[in-house]
Amino acid sequence: MSVITISDGVVSVEIDSGSALLRSIRKNDVEYLWQGDEKYWKSQDVNLFPYVGRLTDEKYIYSGKEYSMKIHGFCGSVTFQSENVSPDSVDFVLRDSEVTRSIYPFSFELRITYSVADGTLTKKCTVENRGDNVMCFGLGSHPGFNVPLGGDGDFSDWYFEFDSESRPVRIGFDQTTCRLNDVNEPFELEDGKRLRLDHSKFDLDAIVLQGMPKSVMLKSDVSGYAVRACYPDMEFLGLWHMPHTNAPYVCIEPWASLPSHSDYVEDLEKQDYLIHLPNGEIYTNTVTFEII
């Protein structure tokens, strides 16, 4: 594995040069990014494109034709090209190919730009529709963060705190298939802002919220370490670790779209929340992680 390192002199970030996945986020010799473990989750990060989550039978329909695609799309099985490498930023570019078009029949360019400044990691995703038809896609991030950060306290000492009070809903998932069941329910936050961590809270898989504030902090009262994630253009937020484990990490997953429904194969042109990008146009979405 070859990595590209970017830094602002305080926060240092390593990214896999082929997969464009985060491999390390360090500040003051403290590792913030989950380093992977087969027992809990062997990955550290996932780039979600052109679909977020699972498809029914790993299939979808577009323009009357059926296609097959695995969970979270194909970014994990293709190679990105690095461009515009500098000490504090780098672009990773993926363009459609014969392989991607057999899975996803669109001509596109996906550009993921990572940059570090003032203690904050920015991930900017730019999608260009290079084809003749409206491009239908989803987009999301999936980095895992160590809990406890810096080894301070126990898992249960940590919590998520949103920047303002809200009354979000939890998106309902079929527990057998991990796809949508259309049973969305109010999700109560302590004082309207806080979700305390407990391993059992992830036993039903990801907590996926809608109607939440667009900024959340992973923090603890026993530590000065924290991560603040901001996702102004994302409709949904997933919080996850491997169910039925005492996994020492949690993933912060801003999503622009949702997985498929549990009981039928989705038609991309009709599925709710997917991004519909006209030919020749460009879509941009930015997520930041402030490393505290």
Image (cartoon, helix red, strand yellow):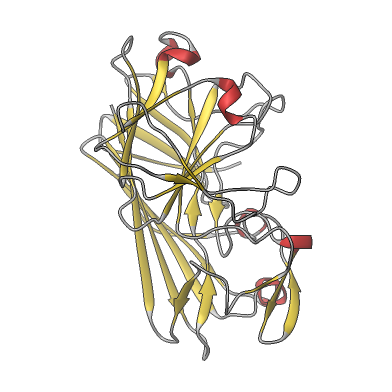
**Res 86 seen here:** no
Of 11 and 61, nearer the camera is: 61
Is residue 43 found left or right of 207 in the rendered image?
A: right
Image coordinates for residue 42, horizontal then vertical, percent: 66, 33
**Res 51 seen here:** yes
Is residue 155 positioned above or below 204 on the image?
Answer: above
Image coordinates for residue 103, horizontal then vertical, percent: 70, 71
Quarter holding the C terminus? Answer: top left
Name the quadrant containing residue 104: bottom right
Q: Residue furthest bottom?
A: 132
Image coordinates for residue 284, horizontal then vertical, percent: 35, 66
Q: How many labels does the image show?
A: 0
Residue in the image at 55% along x and 80% along y: 107
Name the quadrant containing residue 152: top left
Is residue 60 positioned above or below 214 on the image?
Answer: below
Image coordinates for residue 105, horizontal then vertical, percent: 64, 80
Is residue 75 found left or right of 150 in the rendered image?
A: right
Of 45 and 191, nearer the camera is: 191
Quarter holding the N terminus? Answer: top right
Is residue 242 positioned above or below 185 on the image?
Answer: above
Residue in the image at 64% along x and 31% along y: 242
Q: Residue furthest right?
A: 57
Of 30 and 183, nearer the camera is: 183
Of 261 and 274, nearer the camera is: 261
